Amino acid sequence: MGAVEEPAPAYFFQVWGTDDGLPQSSVAALVQTQDGYLWLGTYGGLVRFDGVRFVVYDADRTPGLLSSRVTALYEDERGRLWIGHENGSVTVREGGVFRPVPVPTGWGTGKVLAIVEDEQGEIWLVDDEGVLYRLRDGRRLWPESGIGRGLVSVARGNNGEVWVARNGRVSRLWGGEIAPVDLEGSGGEGFAQGVCASRRGGFWVSYNGRLGRWAEGRWQEEWGGSAVAGYGRAGDAGTFGRYGGGGDNGGRVISCVVPRACPVVYADERVAAGLGAVVVRGSRG
């Protein structure tokens, strides 16, 4: 990987918490939908944020919403908002209406860690062990697992391919099949702490203590130094982060999304979530 160092741009940070309308400070999931709204999943309800005001949807007052404890959020290509719950149930919001979604046989009652759409438009659920279940028919896939424990992150690239980092190893979902990704070029045993899609193509990978962007079958760039890869409890890891270019915490943030463990967030030119819902504006990712 070729090293890249750039001057750190200026960032603007603003923090919102329970005093501003959040039902609680633990943000477990976040997505920005095509209409510009920011949706946050908390253990006190689903929250919509327009930059000024929070609107809370909970199971007691929202018909069709199966649970107030939201652990996963995803917007598909059709603009549907998929909502995963701690009890394993799934809700979808389409046309402003919430409705329950039947889960595959064998899914169980464990929490939905992530939801993702593949290049064929199929929706997959990911449990906290990193196992994928196709929503349509329950097809189950086991990404390759490394020696880590409870380190699972999922990302969808620009072309619809899905990468899963599971306990140190990375796999690729394509055509309904899962296969390992060889980041060493020779089948080596490196350790991947997390993955995050890049808008410029490919994926950012926190790998062997460094951060690099992988695209077109090779490393395109690298951010040296140690990666920020703190995770809350087992299964809570969403993505990863790294401060670069200027010493300790002195550079730009590529990505730092650690639900209930990290108070600062930014994800590859997107807004991301942290403890208490921190919104960070920056330049490129």
Image (cartoon, rainbow, N blue to C red):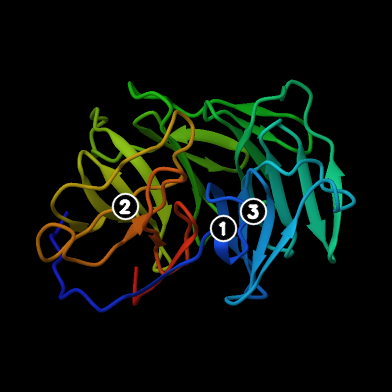
Find the residue positioned furthest to the front. 19
**Residue at which label 1 appears:** 18
Give the secondary structure at mark 1.
helix
**Residue at which label 2 appears:** 241
The amino acid type of the residue labelled 2 equals Gly
The amino acid type of the residue labelled 3 equals Pro
Find the residue positioned furthest to the right. 63
Left or right, 242 with respect to 282, comes to left
Residue 153 against residue 187 in the figure, above or below = below
The amino acid type of the residue labelled 1 equals Thr
Left or right, 186 with respect to 254, comes to left
Give the Cα separation between the discs numbered 2 and 1: 25 Å
Quadrant of the image occupied by residue 191: top left
- Count residues near mark 3 (Cα–Cα under 10 Å), then give few for <14, some for 14-19, many for 20+: many
Left or right, 122 with respect to 5, comes to right
N-term mark: 3 or 2: 3
Q: Position of residue 17 (x, y in %)?
A: 52, 60
Q: Position of residue 209 (x, y in %)?
A: 20, 41
Are discs 3 and 1 less than 8 Å apart at CB?
yes
Quadrant of the image occupied by residue 231: top left
Residue in the picture at 72% in, 65% down: 79
Give the Cα separation between the discs numbered 3 and 2: 26 Å
Residue in the picture at 43% in, 31% down: 233
**Residue at which label 3 appears:** 23
Residue 265 against residue 231 in the figure, above or below = below
